[in-house]
Amino acid sequence: MPDRPRRDVAPRSRDALGRLQLPPPAAMPLDAEAAMVVAAVAGRMAGDLIQAVSFEQVFDGMNRGLVEAGLPIRRVYLAFRTLHPLIAAVSFFWQAGQPVERMVMAHGLAGVSEAWQRSPLNYLLTHDLHWMRRRLTGPEASREFALFEDLVAEGMTDYVATGTAFGSGLGGNGVLASWTADAPDGFSDRDLAILSALQVHLAAACRLAFTAQVSDTVAMTYLGQHAGRRVLSGQIRRGDGELIPAAIFLSDLRGSTAIAEQLGVGRFMELVNRYFECAAEPVLGAGGEVLSLMGDSVLAIFPLAVFGDEVEAACDAALAAARDAERRLELWNRERAAEGEARVDFGIGLHLGRVMFGNIGTAERLQFTAIDRSINETARLEDLTKTLGHRIIASGSFAARATAAWRSLGRVQLRGSAREQEVFTPAPAANRLAIAADVDAGGPPCPVPPDLVVHADWSVDGRKRWMAVATRMEDGRYAAGVPEPVGPVDTLITRLLARARGGRVLLGLDVVLGLPAAYAGLLGATRFVDALDRFALAPEGLEPATRPEEISPGRPFFPRRPGQGQGGPAELARRLGLDGPDDLRRVCEHATIARRAAAPLFWTMGPAQVGRAAAHVWRHLLIPARRDGLDLGLWPFDGRLGELVERHALTVVEAYPAAFHRHLGVRLGRQATNGRGSKRNRNDRAANAATLMEAARRLDLVIDMDLVAELGDGFGNASQGEDRFDAVVGLMGMLQVLAGARPTGEPRLAPVTTVEGWILGQSPAELKLPEDCFS
């Protein structure tokens, strides 16, 4: 276990690490053999560093080298401060025979735990020590720190802690480390001499990692991901650059000069930062690149290469960011109105073109940015928002490739251009469903907040069912810990109700709750619950057919092995008597500006197993709950979300982590920096740790130290890491909806509200469907 109770994964205070002003370790005599060990281990570390392997590999190689040399080391803990806008410190924990655990600590969450205040490493700092040794067994055994009781229980016998300062040049940054032995006699004098001599090499490796991290952070924070990578790869000469095809996004704050004069510098800076949260964060969440924050404007691009060279995908992402910025603006203006403040506004120009992306300036002072006629034209489009009365204006080339409904604003001649061109603004809604729903912007907070909010990442395999739980505290905030196994499905609801202690529970499931309207018509079911009751009487209908001939309205799930020439949704639709594959999808499962169309519900083939997971929940959770008469509300079939939470002990909603990625800023898949990120990859999950911790800050969600550690570690190497990650993302997305930062998405239109259901947080205006689909 790390050098603290499990929840304390790193030094908790930047100030504490900042005060680390320690002299070099006292010299200990090294015999020839010990000197050879130090040289070999130090050389191994240097070689790994030269090869640019991860610091985890450097750390692991060092510890394994010491064990191979005969040192009785069984656990090592290392921590040092970082320079990052979201992360205060990073730590590494090594245990014999286990992979290295990497953990991060966010600013504001550090140094507050009582366990850290009473830890040996904090004692090392506060007493200005660079070396501390404590025997854990024998007549000299120490029990001055609670941690030592845990170490003794694990069979440890000796403990050494070290601290090395980097010097005043970096503001007192340094390295803290602890070494624990399990040999009967603990560390020998030779072992201590080796650790003492190796301390400076370990500190040098950490400083190199720290310096590299500083370079990466500064480059990425101030230049952006794309430009930062190019600068760090060596594109640092004036003129270095390339032409990049991209969708272009430019936003500008209205009346900023007058606002600045009215508010003064301090308050105006606060307002501008809030504006950037509204306009720039959606760009990052949608997979774009913010090139510059120019005073009170945002310039961003959505490179086609990031979206698999799909022009429509890049334009859809840019439009999604613009709409998200509008939603955030409306929420912000509601807050301002409640505080008696005037409304603020901004305009957004959208364009499609090729931009020259590279270095401009003088030989001594360069700026990495995009320059091109397309950028100027985008600025002119944004400028039209002031005179044409629409917040978003797009060029004809952009509107022709973005899959959404548009309204022409006529032909105009952009300033500086010799030709007229037609410009567009998004239609008031993409379809009649969005008009009926009126939910394209965030709504008010849930009037009766649930006492327990749960998101369960579901699977037919019980080992892959995990849930994240947030408990409402007395001050109204929610607190969350690490994900937990769902456990027995048949007792889940009763266990959650008992945990809420008479309060209300909101349970989100990432499975389908509802039926395609065309299929429901075959059953003669006018409500989803009618179909549930029918399946309760004939549960074999929820089992996939063994042969294609067995498919019928009463047994709709596609066979496991359809056989030669029998595959595909088209065949399933034909055997059910439907017109085609589209009749196998609910309205909310069609393609949106954020994602492709979902797999058909009854199609049990493929890795997603959509139908099997839905049938499992219907059969083992919903049907038994109805049979047992539990106080259960199903959204949206039984009413609007706020009403159900107030009226029922437990309300169930359909909620998908993937639907919340853009809202939270999670970047995976096509939205990842390299276009190849995957939630199945531990490092890709860990890369989103800072984003999720920032989302928790915005939500005022209290996350405990164990969850912070799991986020930083990417939820580990175990196969359940993906499921645990999804559980947390789903929980945060649900909390966004409850707080009013996102719309519930619930439309007021049958058959959606009666039989098909809806995905929590999905706005109907995001659908890629023409208006005549909703006659």
Image: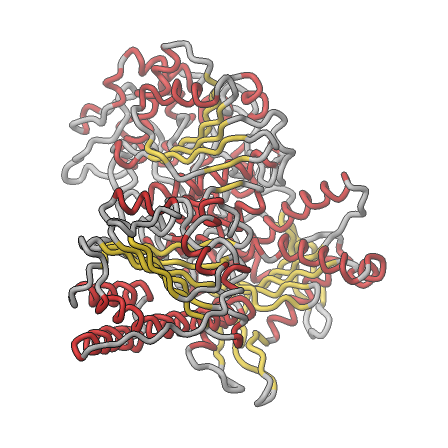
Toward which corner of the image does residue 725 lie, by quadrant? top left
- Is 250 placed above or below 2 here? below
> How far across and how far down the image is residue 114, in percent?
49, 44
Q: Quadrant of the C terminus?
A: top right
Residue at 60% x, 25% y: name it: 448
Total marks shown come to 0
Q: Nearer the viewer, residue 51 or 360?
A: 51
> How far across and how far down the image is residue 336, in percent?
75, 44
Question: From this viewpoint, is residue 37 visible?
Answer: yes
Q: Is residue 775 left or right of residue 9?
A: right
Question: From this viewpoint, is residue 316 visible?
Answer: no
Residue at 45% x, 75% y: name it: 230
> How far across and how far down the image is residue 750, in percent?
52, 24
> How far across and how far down the image is residue 28, in percent?
29, 74
Q: Nearer the viewer, residue 346 or 706?
A: 706
Q: Is residue 702 left or right of residue 523?
A: right
Residue at 52% x, 47% y: name it: 112
